[in-house]
Image (cartoon, grey):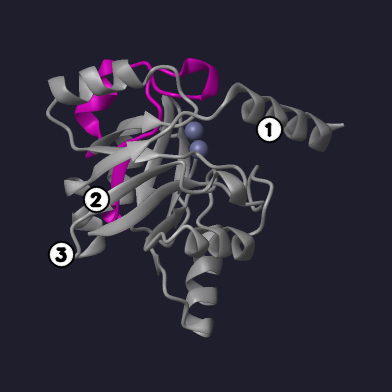
Amino acid sequence: MLKAELHVHSSISDGKDGVRKILNAAMEKKIDVISITDHDTVQGSLEALDIVEEEKLPIKILPGCEITSSSGHILAFGIIKDVEPKMSAEETCRVVRELGGVCFLAHPFDFIRGGSVRLKDFRIVDGVETFNAKSYFNFMAKRYAKKFSKPEIAGSDAHSARAVGLAVNYLPDNINLIESIFHARYDGKRVSIRERLAFLLFQLSQRL
Ligand SMILES: [Zn+2]
Ligand SMILES: [Zn+2]
């Protein structure tokens, strides 16, 4: 089994820490696979691939990003090229698949944080993030993932190195990485209110 963290933001989008610091934290937490899923850019993933290859680090990178589609956030895994934001969920998934990747709905029903609220989107994607460490709508995500028979993953939605590993997936290690996320089992814990507040204050301070 591989321990995988599939939802992390670096300072390339709105995260607090750089890719290097995130990789260090992940290795400290004995994570075997990580996906840096910055908003609308695979730059963080590309940087992670470079670092791991150059330094021969004992961690695997599943490249990806979190795409802002017109109906909500979609996690794309297995792509090394950027996908235009603001396209429909259908179009976004079509482009991601053309690039060899797969699409998972990110924190559906969490309308405050850009989650899709369209049931139709459950049919379009390949799978669903049914545990997001920051979402209060995981029970809904789970209910509809089951209804549409979609594979489920968990994500920390970490915006700092410290939050890496809050929600981890266990993947079989005898098949290729992209395929293995369709067989994920997971556990996780929800971020404390205190941590969420600290993050909000950090985001605010960046804007001032
Ligand atoms: Zn999101
Ligand atoms: Zn996210």
SS for callout 1? helix
Q: Earlier in the sequence, mark 1 or mark 3?
A: 3
Q: Which residue is mark 3?
A: 175
Q: CA distance from mark 1 to mark 2?
A: 28 Å
Given contact means CB atoms under 8 Å apart, are the residues at marks 1 and 2 in contact? Answer: no
Kindly identify the residue that appears in the image at 41 percent across and 69 percent down: 59
Residue range in magenta is 97-126
Q: Is disc 1 surrounded by few (<14), some (14 to 19) or many (20+) residues within 10 Å?
A: some
Q: Is mark 2 within 8 Å of ligand 2?
A: no
Q: In the visual, does 69 lie left or right of 43? A: left
Q: Is disc 3 surrounded by few (<14), some (14 to 19) or many (20+) residues within 10 Å?
A: few
Q: Does the magenta run of residues contain 122?
A: yes
Question: Which mark, residue 199?
Answer: 1
Q: Which residue is mark 2?
A: 181
Q: CA distance from mark 1 to mark 3?
A: 36 Å
Q: Is mark 1 within 8 Å of ligand 2?
A: no
Residue 63 location, x and y as percent?
A: 41, 60
- Answer yes or no: is residue 156 visible: yes
Q: Does the magenta run of residues contain 13?
A: no
Q: Amino acid at mark 3?
A: Ile
